[in-house]
Amino acid sequence: MSLTSQAGAPPGQPPPVVPTEPIWRISVERYHEMIRAGVLTEDDPVELLDGWLVEKMVKSRAHTLATRQVRSAIEGVIPSGWYVDSQEPVTLAASEPEPDALVVRGKPADYPDSQPGAGDVALVVEVADATLGRDRGLKKAIYAQAGIPAYWVVNLSESQIEVYTDPSGPAQKPDYRQRRDFRPGDEVPVLLEGREVGAVRVADVLP
């Protein structure tokens, strides 16, 4: 794995030591240069979060199923002029996360030379099991700071979809001001530019 430490150590060896010295942060531009140069490839399970290369968690089968189901459910209500993507990058000021699902303005061919940015994205979705702490913490703050209007956490551990809206934008502690939880039997409204275009049944998303 390039530029990241493994999560564990080989049998019989001590675990890796967590660095106590400052670790070098990188910009989005440098991150792109590393990809173009082949230093990072699609086989490297990392994403850029707030200037850090963060290792992606291994996906469980439930995570994989929920990702497919939430994408399919959202695609069923999205009108013309938008498209749904999955696990593809969004370029933000200091991050390039790869959410499990996202709703993007236009069509994929509208972005031939760059990834969509915050202003192109109406909704991001993260499916959370082992990643719940990161998705409720670091990733929520990143999306709120970027001003992405809506953020869903498909919380597999608690069988609910958490919907975060009204982002603070740049702030000392960026966050979403509103949160609503939807349980099996509920429907989650899908909003584009402040207008409800349809709804997703929680039961259609949870595996």
Image (cartoon, rainbow, N blue to C red):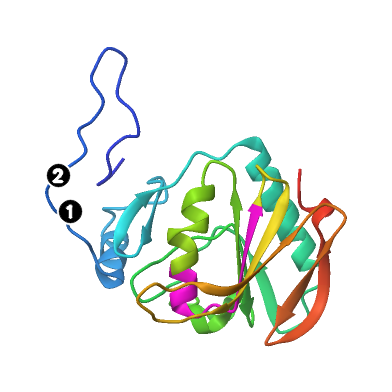
Residue bearing mark 2: 20
Q: In the displayed image of the protein, which residue is found farthest to the left?
A: 21
Q: Is residue 115 visible?
A: no
Q: Residue at x 44, y 47 (%)?
A: 56
Q: Residue at x 54, y 73 (%)?
A: 176
Quadrant in the rendering for residue 85: bottom right
Taking 165 as reference, is 15 above or below it?
above
Residue bearing mark 1: 23
Q: Which region is colored magenta?
A: 142-154
Is 166 displayed left or right of 159 in the figure? left
Quadrant in the rendering for residue 186: bottom right
Q: Position of residue 19 (x, y in %)?
A: 17, 42
Q: CA distance from mark 2 to mark 1?
A: 9 Å
Taking 12 as reference, is 42 above or below it?
below
Find out whether residue 148 is within the magenta segment: yes
Between 92 and 183, the one lying in front of the other is 183
Q: Residues within 10 Å of mark 2 (few under 14, many from 20)?
A: few
Q: Position of residue 141 (x, y in %)?
A: 45, 67
Between 108 and 168, the one lying in front of the other is 168
Mark 2 or 1, closer to the camera: 2
Find out whether residue 189 is within the magenta segment: no
Is 95 displayed left or right of 64 in the figure? left
Q: Residue at x 70, y 48 (%)?
A: 66
Q: Position of residue 65 (x, y in %)?
A: 70, 44
Q: Residues within 10 Å of mark 1 (few under 14, many from 20)?
A: few
Between 33 and 20, the one lying in front of the other is 20
Taking 145 as reference, is 75 above or below it?
above
Question: Mark 2 falls on what kind of element?
Answer: loop
* Residue type, label 1: Ile
Is 49 displayed left or right of 116 in the figure? left
